[in-house]
Amino acid sequence: MVCELHFAEEAIRRNTEVYDEKTGMKNDVPLKICRLQKFAVPTLFPNCPKYISKSPNPVRECLEQRRQRIENEHIQRSIQESKKE
């Protein structure tokens, strides 16, 4: 488990949107326990050297995008090697 101190503020969700059936409006309601945004990555490490912590919270690459990127890199590498021969 990692506490909220290790995440940038934009990675933490403190409110949720709730639909009120009586008024037909959506309201922001504070959460009792804060939640992380999807794909949040811990980037802040207090009491550690500054080079370890990063200010912006990077978005993790989804599995399908990662597979596609790696496949494209392999194809490009194969093309480059075939041109050398």
Image (tube, helix red, strand yellow):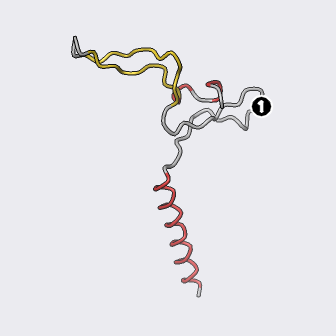
Residue shown at 59% from the left, 88% from the top: 85
Residues 71 and 50: in front is 71
Q: Taking 34 as reference, is 74 above or below it?
A: below
User: Residue, x 44% and y 19% (percent of image)?
Assistant: 15
Instruction: Name which residue lies at 53% across and 19% down.
Output: 33
Quadrant showing the N terminus: top right
Q: Residue at x 48, y 36 (%)?
A: 38
On screen, residue 51 versus residue 85, left or right, reads: right
The location of residue 5, given as percent across then percent down, is 65, 24
Question: At label 1, which amino acid type do we have?
Answer: Cys
Q: Nearer the viewer, residue 83 or 29?
A: 29
Task: Give percent across and percent down for residue 59.
Answer: 52, 41
Q: Quadrant of residue 4?
A: top right
Report the residue that reaches farthest toward the front.
21
Determine which quarter of the picture holds residue 53: top right
Report x, y in % for residue 48: 77, 31
Task: Report the front residue among 43 and 27.
Answer: 27
What kind of element bears circle 1? loop
Residue labelled with disc 1: 48
The x and y percentages for residue 18 are: 34, 19
